[in-house]
Image: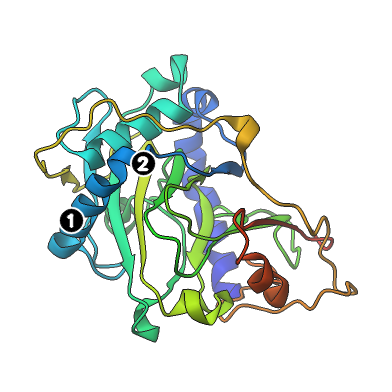
Amino acid sequence: MGAASRRRRVTQRRRMRVVVRRHVKLRALTTFPAFVGVFDGAVPGAVLPQLEAEALALWAESGGSRSSAKSFWVDARSRPTSALGALATAVVDAHFAGAARAAVRGAEVWVQLRDGSSPATRGLEFHFDKCERSLAERDDWRHPALATATYLTDSGAPLVVFDTTSDGGDDARASPPRGWIVAPRRARHVAFAGDRLHGVPDEIATDSERESDRLSILVNVWTDCKPLGLGPLPAFGGDAADLALDVDRERTRVWLPLERISPDSDTPLFALREHREGDTGLIPTPLWRAYSREAAAALELRYLDA
């Protein structure tokens, strides 16, 4: 799988030369760090029940595996016609301002319900968010500017993000420079650069987390294009137009208990089932399981072999 990953990167670099030239000015307005942050209590409590009801309704209508679940479009200048639409607009407003806000085309919205009753549905494989049809029809990788997840439950496997991009790089390092692990918490909002590798590996969840449902709303913000084939987000009858996210950077909760991860560390490290050399790094699984019970369960990993 590592060799295939490298081949993907070489062809991707060739394809991206033209795309980068075309969009370099716009991308300069919307560049984010690899990991933007974890924001607890970001969603107002009063709107959570409405968001949960709409999320479950959308899942029932268009949910499924990562390859089959449908996502929808919210135009950056439209008025929300649902709480989900209001959340999408709030995500844009919270993370983009000025010229960057004016450059936003819109937001892609979908829901994920990870069913704790079945091992087959508890996690989500590692992937890059992208315009699926552009890749399938044109062999063109296009990523959102920003990827976000907003959680409506306190349970389920954690999100894992690696500082790995689809265009790769020319080095042959054994690990990405950094990784992040974030446990779901109700009203928690997580944001990271839209071209990073991420997934939900249930193998590092505790038994209680693994057996519980995990409900999240995913909002990706697009600037250089609208993904092909997306229809408008359904209207649910309640616009929640005054919804605003609290993403005060001073309250970002990211723990750094392990400043460095190295092969000779005293902390036991384990490869994930989907480990790919150069794309993913090792995980301090026992330490994570202990930390995930805490209120501010987020961990940044730094790898010495990068």
Considering the image in quadrants, where does the C terminus appear?
bottom right
Nearer the camera: disc 1 or disc 2? 2
Considering the image in quadrants, where does the N terminus appear?
bottom right
Horizontal and vertical percent position of residue 161: 57, 57
Residue at 56% of width from left, 59% of height from top?
9
Residue 60, picture quadrant: bottom left
Q: What amino acid is at disc 2?
A: Gly
Q: What amino acid is at disc 1?
A: Leu
Residue at 22% of width from left, 64% of height from top?
63
> Alpha carbon of mark 1 to alpha carbon of mark 2: how far?
20 Å
Horizontal and vertical percent position of residue 121: 35, 78
Q: Is any atom of residue 277 visible in this view?
A: no
Horizontal and vertical percent position of residue 264: 90, 74
Residue farthest toward the top in the current orientation of the protein: 98
Query: What crowding class fits label 2: few (fewer than 14 Cα within 10 Å), some (14-19), or many (20 or more)?
Result: few
51 versus 216 height, above or below: above
Q: Is residue 283 left or right of residue 76?
A: right
Q: Nearer the viewer, residue 55 or 76?
A: 55
Q: Could you tell which of marks 1 and 2 lies nearer the N-terminus? A: 2
176 versus 284 height, above or below: above
Query: What crowding class fits label 1: few (fewer than 14 Cα within 10 Å), some (14-19), or many (20 or more)?
Result: many
Q: Name the residue under label 2.
A: 45
Q: Name the residue under label 1.
A: 58
Q: Is any atom of residue 234 visible in this view?
A: yes
- Secondary element under disc 2, as helix, strand or loop, is helix
Residue at 62% of width from left, 35% of height from top?
251
Residue 94, picture quadrant: top left
Horizontal and vertical percent position of residue 250: 65, 31
Q: Which of 160 and 86 is in front in this view?
A: 86
- Secondary element under disc 1, as helix, strand or loop, is helix
Q: Is residue 286 left or right of residue 90?
A: right
Q: In this view, does 70 lie to the left or right of 37?
A: left
